[in-house]
Image (cartoon, rainbow, N blue to C red):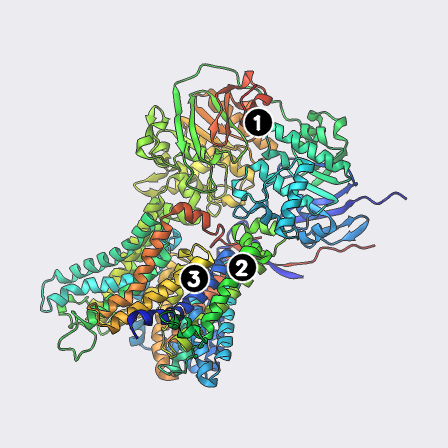
Amino acid sequence: MSGIAFILAGTLAAATPLLLAALGEMVVERSGVLNLGLEGMMALGAALGFIVVFLTGNHALGFLVAGLGGAVLSLVFASLVLGFVANQVAAGLGVGLLGLGLSSLVGKAYESRTVPGLPRLHLPGLSDLPLVGPLLTQDIVVWLSLVLALGLWAVLAHSKAGLVVRAVGENPHAARALGFPVIAIRCGAIAFGGTLAGLAGAYASTVYTPLWADGMIAGRGWIALALVVFGTWATGRIVFGALLFGALSLGELSAQAAGVGLPSQVLASLPYAVTILMLAVISSDRRRMRRTAIASLGQPFEP
Amino acid sequence: MRLALIRRDTAARGAMIAAPAVALVLTILCSLVLFAVLGKPAGTALYALLLEPFLSWYSFSEVLLKMAPLCLIAQGLAIGFRANVFNIGAEGQLVIGAIAASALPVWYPDGTSALMLPAMLLLGGLGGMAWGAIAAGFRTRFNANEILVTLMLALIAAQVLNYLLLGPWKDPAGFNFPQSVLFPDAALLPILLPGTRVNVSLLLALAASGLAWVVMRHRFSGYQLLVGGMAPRAAAYAGFSERRAIWISLLVGGLAAGLAGAAEVAGPLGQLQRSVSTGYGYSAIIVAYLGGLNPLGIVLSSFLVSALFIGGDNAMVSAGLPVAAVWVFQSLLLVFYLGGLAFLRYRLVVMHRPAQSVP
Amino acid sequence: MAAPPLLSLEGISKSYGAVRANRGIDLTVDPGQVHAILGENGAGKSTLMKLIYGVETPDEGRILWKGRPVTLANPADARALGIGMVFQHFSLFETLSVVQNIALIVPGSRATLAGRIRDLGREFGLEIDPDAMVHDLSVGERQRVEIIRCLLRAPDLLILDEPTSVLPPQGVERLFATLRALRTKGMAILFISHKLEEIRALCDVATILRAGEVTGRLVPRDHSAADLATRMIGRNIPPPAHPVAHDLGEVRLELAGLDHAAEDPFGVSLSGLSLAVRGGEIVGIAGISGNGQKELAALVSGEIAQPALRRDTVRLMGQPVGDTGVAGRRRLGLAFVPEDRLGRGAVPEMSLADNALLTAHGQGLVRRGFIARAAERAFSARVIAGFDVRSRGPEAEAGSLSGGNLQKFIMGREILLSPKVLLVAQPTWGVDVGAASDIRQRLVAMRNDGVAILVISEELEELFEICDRLHVLHKGRLSPSLPTRTTTTEDVGTWMIGGRAA
């Protein structure tokens, strides 16, 4: 396969864990909460998902357990920041480290084991097209993630539920005065974000690279957090950002395979460096950031 | 009837003491269950984790050895955290500090100059500061969130370390292990307690703690940082510069982590190797919060967390507990502590439903 | 038997911690009645309204709606019964459009809602573009959105919390016309205010609250404003002494063609602002909040600094300071009392002593970089004693003080800096009448001592009471200087809606 075709075929799959995690985090931040535990929630989902698939061979069950694991861990975070009005940064870091620790604890026995991935769906006609064929031949989770993105866009932009989440994120006190249960709404958003983070982790460990290695999430949770900022809390731009990073990681792999004269560590650092540059570019437009940023983000809410 | 947290008029200082104690008890209970579920001998594991570090002079000295970097880094981070500048990439600043300090002994493996060690510490501190300064520059110049930038820089630093140890700095006589040459004696920190590995970096950490206490408690500059963290708009109103707070926080955090990195390679490791990065930078975040972001509290919390690391090594042998258990334990401590901290500002009350109509 | 009243409260009490906000309140509202709740800041008016609207639940007592006891657990319950509320600090969301804000609590498709918004707007003089983004609307327009949002649910009772504080005098007339039209349709209105003339002009009945208790019920038209004031406050307030004219000093603060493009997309841009304040005079900035007051204050205080090229647009003590920060301007003798006390003028979690340090560090409170604790405590004790700050002393946390006492502390701290120029924004917002009158007297005393004072306030009466001259700020532009002795409130009102005096 040529480099371009390789990248085309793999970009969507590489983007999917980032996309799922970032979409979940977008909803959490839209409601006014910053969840820095994303990396740990992904890691826990990855470990649980891998173990279940390894033991049962059932991907659906693996994703279910991974989503539940992410949700449970996110509810620990929710009880800290919503119930106990804890500092969101500290609570996110603490719960994130807990997730990382738990993932390597439960995954210890499965180190370097592998599971079969998911088959790519052959779409009659479309998959045989030149050039775009590989792009359109993807596994089911990739397609479901894109459908989810579309659905989230519609909900946030056009439904009452979306309006309520946005209202809570902009001004929780006014939302409460109108009678919306701010704490419950934020709790729901956090659980949703945790579930998606768990699913994202499971995709990384059971489909994208179907093997368990401690630390395999490798900063993807943090990149997803950066994607939410890069995407200025808008679904479409987050999808674009995730695809960009998917392509970048594929480019890194194919550059390594092609024996580009750069040390592999330089290529491995590339996504992180690009994340920093991308944050700088988008954040330096302060007017735009203030217009799009979530007004109550990171601030504790006391009724 | 339901429970509710009601804000107190004045902070209940007792909660600062009670929260860590309650957190420790809850963490122990939680871990007992967790270890049992994982099929590990929970009692043995906890004994190894919590008591064994104090049962032999050697273990205790190892606690003091590990406490030094944790305490030093956490003191640096806490200053930033109190100013609302969240440097979570101390691990990267530590690695870069270790690399910068290692440059001298790697290039002059036979050096005997008495200046070598001070120069290494200086380079280590500067290296850590430089790594922090990148984040400060991106934050002040481009408004880029320092949480994400410092974390990304930590991931990059890990790759820099890999590159050096697998490439140019690999010890040619090291059987292809990813490690540098062994450092000469002139590049090693003097031992503080004879017969142990405890070196003078412990004094450095304690001195830094004292300094942090003076600055945050008695210096106007520390006060300005506190105001910036508690009420950013009040700081702007009073004319305390936010840029300055960001630069100070990230430079001090980087300096402390860089020094800790230099002290690791010039101390227990005696060479640059991958194990210089074992997560002290992340653990120090937990240490800083567990210590209530208070310089004296951090001395205690660094001691506790260091003991957990030593106990974890023991538990690995005696109870087959993976190192990850230590991380689970630490982060559970932080989670429970953060919950308990609510009682500093709030009290729990039982709310009754309003009296209903009586015909 | 007569029909039961629309709403009646029986023995309603509500406490927040040790504060008993409402005590044994009885109240009846009949259909088609405009009922005033009269009381000064802190009397418990807002708490009572929150109980009626279900934002809070009472500790004791019962609420009857059309004769039946009801439990209002949240605002949705209240809206379902037919109660609507227009909040003082609006419950609108800036990043949403008008119709989206309304769709939050009114069912219906976007198109139907937009049509109904236009219809209602025409019927009651509340025209608004349904697709406008709320952050583009003026404060008065936002109030219309709030009222329309309530009216769309066809309530039987409409609660308005201090609705006129955001309106120019002409806007008040327009609002009253709307409310009278609603009354003739049989709607009951609860009108919360501390503006006595307005209550006399509009309301059929008034219930007076003082310190959380009902202290009287009367027909406001039968009483003079002075009588109402005495009943509201519980004692006589000496009539304000207008400052006598006296010789003026040199120009100490000058704005010369100050322009400012708002960096905040929700902020207001200022253009061509010019004014001068001399030693020994008080100059007021009148106008509805949201017309550039915050930006003007920040540009004068130095919280927003200008590029060096435009440093001449702000002059302090004769020196160009447009590009100087807060600290530099304070060194030249500027002191500033901001409109937000908690989190800006003071750090809530810090003690009063530490809050003194915030701006008084130059008064010997810091020696060689070390905080001089004894001096810090002594300075704050002087503020507390000199300005009658009710607190547990210098160790009390700023957040534990009442609004009025904290304002006195901040005002006192800034006055003890012996400034040459004093900038005060909204000096008496949320402050009880006694403290407010204290604060105004202090300002006049400082003026008489030769300090140049610039006061930004929404309270027109307050400005007329203490200022020598005033300017009106409207949409980021300043009116010419208007001497208070020869200007009427109507003239000012015209400038407040942007028109030139006829």
What is the spatial separation of the Cα atoms under label 2 and label 1, in whole angstroms?
47 Å
Q: Is label 3 on the same chain as label 1?
A: no
- Circle 2 residue: A154
For label 1, count other residues whose C-alpha is less than 10 Å away and answer few (under 14), some (14-19) or many (20+).
Answer: some
Q: Report the chain holding disc 2.
A: A
Mark nearer the N terminus (3 vs 2): 2
Instruction: Pick the quarter of the image with the N terminus of chain C.
Output: top right
Report if residue C61 is visible in the image. yes
Mark 2 Cα-neighbour bin, 10 Å: few <14, some 14–19, many ≥20: few
Estimate the x, y position of residue B153 in percent, counting from the top left: 30, 61
Residue C29 occupies which quadrant of the picture? top right
**Which residue position is annotated with label 1?**
C460
* Chain containing mark 3: A
Point out which mark residue A239 bears: 3
Task: Give the residue type that dot 1 points to.
Answer: Leu
Compared to residue A286, the image places residue C206 above or below, namely above
The Cα atoms of the two marked residues, 3 and 1, are separated by 52 Å
Q: Chain of mark 1?
A: C
